[in-house]
Image: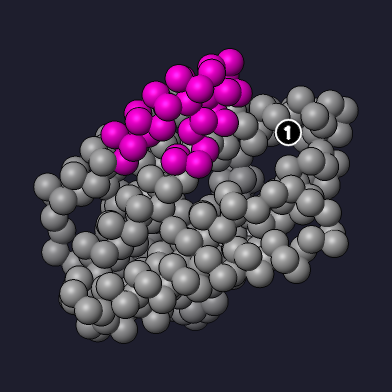
Amino acid sequence: MPSARLPLVTTHPVWSVAQIAGMVLTTVLVFSLVRWPDLSLHVLWDMVIPLLPAVFLVNPLVWRNVCPLATLNAFGGTRRATPVMLTSTQSTAGVVGIVLLLLMVPARRLLFNEHGVALAATIVAVAALALMAGYLAPRRSGFCNSLCPVLPVEKLYGQSPLVAMGSARCGDCARCTPVGCIDLVGRRSAVQSVVGIRGEQWLLSPFGAFACAFPGFVIGYFTTTNGDGATAASTYAHVALWSLGSVAVLGMIARVIRVRASLMLLALGGLSAGIYYWYAAPRLAAAFGGGATMGIGTRIFALCLVSLWFVHGMRRPWRPSVV
């Protein structure tokens, strides 16, 4: 399959420096999680991770261009794709990525929020998976565009990027991910993930179901508390009930008022991001030394950002091949 030049390809050497820095910082993080777990967990979970959804709203390529796992994936991912590879990757790996996300986030309450060594070991394991996938599958199809548990969130929050940006990874396109590739189609990635599923049946697709479940999933996580293995069943059940309730309520709304997939996916992305920062903003402000007032201000700022993102998406409609 012939290659095609990507739009807005970003080749500035600053990105190469940022990618090296990402690898170095990840190495430092793994070491710090073992040596100074309490401080490292605080910085990671309370100061760094809460900023990522906002980065995705600006443009998920900001993160994808520097992600250390993507850098590892790129070490081996140079082969071009064949139709067999493409079919296999598109049919299964994307679902695995969604499942990994749904399993790993509640696991924060049971393990990763308080146990640095366990988190460090998991980071190393996922890094090894990204590296191995780069050698086994063409280009970014083996991990970044399939197995990565962050990918579904990138697609959901990447529907209305506030800043135009190109990929610093793909100087040319090998079509390793022909449908729903953020690096190739940008904000249309979420809609393309339900392409070919007509009418309201898009809700039953893996990505459509994930998008409907995600607002409840976020609430479910934030309304649980840290525990140990003995609380695993109750934690996962609580998050699952909120997720299923979200699918039931939001899916019913979509069916009753017959909202087209493109608009509903945009609304689900904005709703999920708004809920996330409603819960996360006060603790984020506190982590940077702010009090209750700064927490309220951070929450207001975040909700304004989400509103701007949604309005921006509404003012720039696309014409997907999905009704």
Color encoding of the figure: one colour
Residue denoted by label 1: 41
Q: Is residue 206 left or right of residue 72?
A: left
Q: Position of residue 305 (x, y in %)?
A: 31, 35
Q: Residue at x 34, y 59 (%)?
A: 268
Q: Is residue 78 visible?
A: no
Instruction: Say which quarter of the image contains residue 147.
Output: bottom right
| Mark 1 secondary-structure assignment | helix
Q: Does 322 appear in magenta?
A: no
Badge 1 amino acid: Leu
Indicate left or right for 148 with 321 as reference.
right
Residue 68 sits in quarter:
top right
Give x and y (percent) for residue 56: 41, 42
Report the span colored magenta. 277-306
Q: Residue at the location (37% across, 34% down)?
A: 302
Q: Nearer the viewer, residue 318 or 132?
A: 318
Residue at horizontal 40 percent and vertical 67 percent from the top = 212
Quarter of the rendering occupied by the N terminus: bottom left
Which part of the image, by quadrant, shows the C terminus?
bottom left
Residue 153: give x, y in percent of width and height. 46, 54
